[in-house]
Amino acid sequence: MSNPILERAASNGVSLEMRGAVAVVSLRRPAKRNALNDALVEALRDVFQNLPADARAAVIQGEGDHFCAGLDLSELKERNAGEGMHHSRGWHVALDAVQFGRVPVIAALHGAVVGGGLELASASHIRVADESTFYALPEGTRGIFVGGGGSVRVPKLIGVARMTDMMLTGRVYNAQDGERLGFAQYLVPQGQALDKAIELATRIATNAPLTNYALMHALPRIAEQPADHGLFTEALMASIAQSAPEAKERVRAFLEGKAAKVQKSS
Ligand code: 1HE
């Protein structure tokens, strides 16, 4: 790796390894359960803002027994109100780099996905959880609030009522319930989340890049627009995507019987 930004990120606990066209990003602070201190949040931001040009999809995972224990609570105790505001805004920039970067991001989840760890997972586009995964928002019981975009992103997955309950009561959801409620789109046996995430990312990497980009950037914005505006944005995005040479080639291949049909699922 010769990129100094990625080298600095690696020394601060976030490494990147290319597997074909998939960038595998790893949180590497297992002794602290991948708790996110300031250096790690900045490293995450830097990695996702500087993915290699040949990356067409990314996976994020945590080393050790847990995906991520959330905010590093040891850094919280010294912060005043102004510093707290800037700290939260720094998380927003980092997690926006995950959600609104250049390529789709698949989170491979296991063990604790809690607090800021759940906020990070929620910024990804697809979540694959193994059976050891559990989800919680201990902020409520620790006397704090979410600050990494959780109040915006988590209700989009499970609804405001469930998030309120999690924060008021400290409720923890297991992997099965998490999939049923919408935290994860895929549930796999213990130890298999990373392989499944890489398999999905490898498939996604073969899509037309402009279609992937449109899905990541247009869908969440359209969801927040009034219907009339959303339909207009959709029409704009559709016309841009279908005018790309790659789209024309792919459609022609299907019409000539050279592209796969949609198969009934088993
Ligand atoms: C930590 C953190 C952390 C572990 N900050 N140091 N997040 C939380 O409230 C979750 C807090 N963590 C836990 O509940 C547990 O650690 C776990 C369920 C994740 C894992 O349990 P376990 O038994 O495997 O590990 P452990 O023994 O609790 O922790 C191992 C070490 O990691 C230990 O340090 P050590 O020096 O004694 O070895 C822990 O202190 C340390 N550790 N989690 C700091 N979070 C943008 S705002 C977001 C707001 C939030 O995210 S609030 C939620 C914070």
Image (spheres, grey):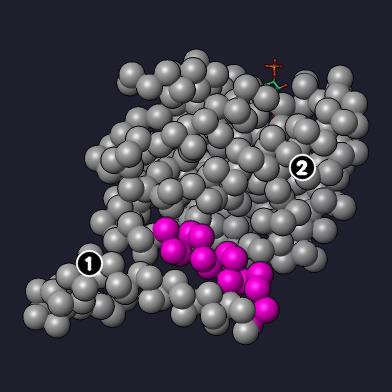
Is residue 131 shown to the viewer in this render?
no
- Pick whichever of labels 1 and 2 is earlier in the sequence: 2
Give the quadrant of residue 138. Answer: top right
Q: Secondary structure at mark 1?
A: helix
Main SS, magenta residues = helix
Q: Label for residue 60?
A: none
Q: Magenta segment, which residues?
A: 213-227
Comparing 139 with 251, the one in front is: 251
Instruction: Work out how far the residue at label 1 is from the one at label 2, CA to CA, in angstroms.
Output: 42 Å
Q: Residue at x 60, y 58 (%)?
A: 183
Q: Residue at x 55, y 82 (%)?
A: 231
- Report the quarter where the N terminus lies: top left
Amino acid at dot 2: Gly
- Report the quarter where the C terminus lies: bottom left
Q: Secondary structure at mark 2?
A: loop
Where residue 30 appears, x then y in whole percent?
56, 23
Where residue 220 appears, x then y in whole percent?
58, 64
Label 2, ligand 1: CB separation under 8 Å? yes
Residue to which mark 2 is pinned: 147
